């Protein structure tokens, strides 16, 4: 159960300030680790995360993907640079360092490209803010238990199935259902288990660091479509890269992501919208939020 003294907040941070003297190197350098080339090929997921990060204000984004899908990834995310995803954590961390990354997003479309121990080493070896999603979460669950240093710098963004695997991996048997109270309890259990900020996706996404909790009210059933979670990963990573603290970046990212989905659904209908449409409506959502906060 959530702690009795947990603060239920409706407060959403303002958008990061942008200096008139800003340049692409100081408004967020994001590395996205993802993609796979196995029996199933996943190239769209990391590209979607990259495009969402750019739409959310990131200055520079680099994709690290398997060599066979580099060209395809570059075509899908033309504003990003694309490097080859190596097999070892040491080589990956070297690439992250060479890019001078402020933030790492780990997991979109990753499949089994990396082993669980490599994911654990990346979480330990990179000291900056991170977003872990999709197969990054599944590989974290499969890793031998380890201590994540300064875990509150990290945002985990599981859907209920990924949440279940993460809790089971550490022997936590809290139920994960669609019931609102159960979802809140499960999110708090995950914070207690791993020490990270958590955004439990779904209707009324729950965002918490164990002390504060936010229940999102934007978004709709049309967002139940492949790639929507990758878009959220990119939005949160971009906000982190612009200096928004981890919990606040997760709350604001979830809100803007849902608002963009609402605008897309209003224009296109819930049945027909895609994750790409959420990206296309991010500027409208961001402008709406910015104008509302200026009033």
Image: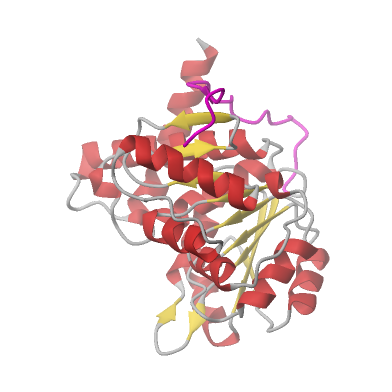
Q: Name the residue at 64% across, 72% down.
A: 144
**Between residues 67 and 228, which one lies in front from this camera angle?**
228
Residue lying furthest top in this view? Answer: 295
**From the viewer's perspective, is residue 13 above or below residue 222?**
above
**Can I make out residue 55 in this image?**
no
**Looking at the image, can residue 33 be seen?**
yes
Q: Could you say where residue 3 lies in the image, as x and y percent from the top left?
A: 54, 30
Q: Magenta includes 18?
A: yes
Residue at 60% x, 37% y is: 209
- Residue 260 location, x and y as percent? 37, 39
Horizontal and vertical percent position of residue 157: 50, 51
Q: Quadrant of residue 161?
A: bottom left
Tell me where residue 294 appears, x and y as whole percent.
54, 14
- Count of numbered badges drawn on the protein: 0
Q: Which residues are magenta?
A: 1-24
| Whether residue 239 is situated above or below residue 287 in the rendered picture | below
Residue drawn 76% across the image and 63% down it? 124
Q: In this rendered view, identify the residue nearer to me: 69 or 13.
A: 13
- Tell me: residue 172, above or below residue 139: above
**Left or right, residue 44 beside residue 117:** left
Q: Nearer the viewer, residue 20 or 126?
A: 126
Q: Main secondary structure of the magenta part?
A: loop
Residue 51 as seen in the image, left or right of residue 81: left
Residue located 78% across and 78% down the image: 91
Q: Does 98 appear in magenta?
A: no
Name the colour scheme: secondary structure
């Amino acid at each position: 159960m959530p702690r009795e003294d947990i603060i239920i907040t409706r407060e959403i941070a303002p958008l990061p300030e942008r200096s008139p003297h800003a340049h692409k190197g100081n408004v967020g350098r994001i590395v996205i680790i993802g993609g796979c080339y196995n029996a199933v090929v996943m190239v769209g997921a990391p590209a979607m995360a990259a495009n969402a990060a750019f739409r959310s204000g990131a200055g520079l984004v680099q994709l690290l993907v398997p060599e066979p899908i580099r060209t395809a990834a570059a075509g899908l995310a033309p504003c990003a640079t694309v490097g080859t995803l190596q097999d070892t954590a040491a080589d990956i961390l070297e690439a992250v360092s060479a890019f001078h990354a402020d933030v790492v997003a780990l997991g979109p479309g990753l499949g089994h490209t990396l082993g669980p121990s490599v994911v654990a080493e990346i979480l330990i070896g990179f000291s900056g803010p991170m977003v872990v999603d999709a197969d990054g979460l599944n590989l974290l669950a499969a890793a031998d238990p380890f201590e994540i240093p300064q875990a509150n710098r990290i945002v985990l963004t599981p859907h209920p199935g990924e949440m279940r695997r993460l809790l089971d991996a550490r022997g936590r048997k809290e139920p994960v259902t669609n019931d609102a109270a159960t979802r809140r309890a499960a999110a708090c259990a995950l914070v207690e288990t791993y020490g990270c900020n958590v955004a439990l996706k779904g209707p009324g996404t729950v965002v918490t660091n164990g002390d504060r909790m936010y229940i999102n009210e934007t978004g709709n059933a049309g967002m139940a479509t492949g790639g929507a979670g990758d878009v959220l990963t990119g939005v949160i990573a971009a906000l982190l890269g612009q200096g928004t603290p981890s919990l606040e970046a997760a709350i604001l990212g979830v809100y803007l992501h849902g608002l963009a989905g609402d605008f897309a659904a209003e224009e296109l209908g819930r049945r027909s919208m895609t994750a790409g449409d959420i990206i296309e409506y991010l500027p409208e959502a961001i402008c709406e939020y910015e104008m509302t906060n200026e009033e």
